[in-house]
């Protein structure tokens, strides 16, 4: 069924051209048609669901370059004093605690909450990493089920780790590979210091066979560099570079906070992407991302922060203002939109033109090409979102999800949340 958006203003996210137009959204083909280019006939719009978008703006919806649904409810955990906040405390008192209790019900609830939050933030595609070691078989299907129900498309991966032993890592790798054989997915590794040479080699063989990459946490904390140097006499990026895992356009290196100039050169020499998660890192007291190379293959994610991708764009921009690697709002905007290029380049599904956000502008400033990015950086609020369209279907309207009963879903999440607080 087609959807007709009447009397709106379409914003092209690449050119920033503003076009007053009616838009015919096709659910099947993924395409858009604009009355400003070619007026619609009565036959073409007959039977279409019509939404009045007068005084509203319409643009491509957002995509999230990195999200961890399994930790979406971690906000309920202890808030550390900044002097107490360390990477190890985050691991031991949040990540490991949640994982110890993880089962299908908890993961489903966590993924459902993550999907609802993403949709209401205007996100219709999320690159998701799972890292549950207690619940393995069926875990990726559980996450996909929750996101599908809300209407958010996914690219999934499962982070293999030796933290629970090599046999557990192999089970995760096998589960990831089995899921990827029938679903949209890439392989996953937790981090260099949590992956033996055997783990890297096993994953690389699968990547080479399928010609798809890996998602791996890279030097999120100095611990990764120190332990990798101790055990493998290599810095993290050099080890991955030599392994061949950075050879794929679908490979994603997350964070890369603690890398040096030589490692940046190695990354720039390969087609792999880096995803920066400024809100999640800020919450955990991790140093701001070094943006020297922001114009390369850098995209933005939210991790498990619950933030919107607009929040990530803002934080990425704000964090550099007092540093020598100052970036502009335009550069932050480019990084926010880079995930769309990543999806197109690798021919993943779920981010066609019929994924849209319809929003209002409550400020007295008239929006145009010259000030739109500034508006996103300083004024845009998720409360301004009137409608979110995913694959041609309305999945959020007037602040509420449409494909799932949000009140009932949140009740289910609340019951599972009691287990980990």
Image (cartoon, rainbow, N blue to C red):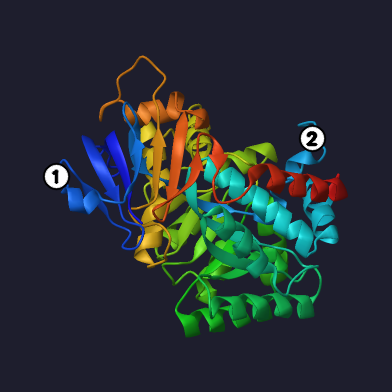
Q: Of tags 2 and 1, which is closer to the observer? A: 1
The percent position of residue 158, horizontal first and vertical second, equals 64, 68
Q: Residue at x 45, y 28 (%)?
A: 380
Q: Is 244 left or right of 51, judged from the image as shown?
A: right
| 200, 50: nearer the viewer | 50
What's the residue at 41%, 45% (across, down)?
61
Residue 414 visible in the shown view: yes
Q: How many other residues sit within 10 Å of disc 1, few (<14), some (14-19) or many (≥20)?
A: few
Q: Residue furthest left?
A: 38
Quadrant of the image for the C terminus?
top right
Q: Mark yes or no: residue 289 visible.
A: no
Q: Is residue 353 left or right of residue 206?
A: left
| Residue named by callout 2 | 79
- Write the residue at 79% across / 32% down: 83
Instruction: Name the spot of residue 366 as percent of width and height, x first.
Output: 30, 20
Mark 2 secondary-structure assignment: loop
Q: Position of residue 105 (x, y in %)?
A: 78, 60
In terms of image quadrants, where is residue 120?
top right
Question: Of callouts 2 and 1, which one flags the residue occurring earlier in the amino acid sequence?
Answer: 1
Q: Secondary structure at mark 1?
A: loop
| Residue denoted by label 1 | 39
- Please tell me how many numbered marks the rendered image carries: 2
Above/below status of 348 relative to 351: below
């Amino acid at each position: 069924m087609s959807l007709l958006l009447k009397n709106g203003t379409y914003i092209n996210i690449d050119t920033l051209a503003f076009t007053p137009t009616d838009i015919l959204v096709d659910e099947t083909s993924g395409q858009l048609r604009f009355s400003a280019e070619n007026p619609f006939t009565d036959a073409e719009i007959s039977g279409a669901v019509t939404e009045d978008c007068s005084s509203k703006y319409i643009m491509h919806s957002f995509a999230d370059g990195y999200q961890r649904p399994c930790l979406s409810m971690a906000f309920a955990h202890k808030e550390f004093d900044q002097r107490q906040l360390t990477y190890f405390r985050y691991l031991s008192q949040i990540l490991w605690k949640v994982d110890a209790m993880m089962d299908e019900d908890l993961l489903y609830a966590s993924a459902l909450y993550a999907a609802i939050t993403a949709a209401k933030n205007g996100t219709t595609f999320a690159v998701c990493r799972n890292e549950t070691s207690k619940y393995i078989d069926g875990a990726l299907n559980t996450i996909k089920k929750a996101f599908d129900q809300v209407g958010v498309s996914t690219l999934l991966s499962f982070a293999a780790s030796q933290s629970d032993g090599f046999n557990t890592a192999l089970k995760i790798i096998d589960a990831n590979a089995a899921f990827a054989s029938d679903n949209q997915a890439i392989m996953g590794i937790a981090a260099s210091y949590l992956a033996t040479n055997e783990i890297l080699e096993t994953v690389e063989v699968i990547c080479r066979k399928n010609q798809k990459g890996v998602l791996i946490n890279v030097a999120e904390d100095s611990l990764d560099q120190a332990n990798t140097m101790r055990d493998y006499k290599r810095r993290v990026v050099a080890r991955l570079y030599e392994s061949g895992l950075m050879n794929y356009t679908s490979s994603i290196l997350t964070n890369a906070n603690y890398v040096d100039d030589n490692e940046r050169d190695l990354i720039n020499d390969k087609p792999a992407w880096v995803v920066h998660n400024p809100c999640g890192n800020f919450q955990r007291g991790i140093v701001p991302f070094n943006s020297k190379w922001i114009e390369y293959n850098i995209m933005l994610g939210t991790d498990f922060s619950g933030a919107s991708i607009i929040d990530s764009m803002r934080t990425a921009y704000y964090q550099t203002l007092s540093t020598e690697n100052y970036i502009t709002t335009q550069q932050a905007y480019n990084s926010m939109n880079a995930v769309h290029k990543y999806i197109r380049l690798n021919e993943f599904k779920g981010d066609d033109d019929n994924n849209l956000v319809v929003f209002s502008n409550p400020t007295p400033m008239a929006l145009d090409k010259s000030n739109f990015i500034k508006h996103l950086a300083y004024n845009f609020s998720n409360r301004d979102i009137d409608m979110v369209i995913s694959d041609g279907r309305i999945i959020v309207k007037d602040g509420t999800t449409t494909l799932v009963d949000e009140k009932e879903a949140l009740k289910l999440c609340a019951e599972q949340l009691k287990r980990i607080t």
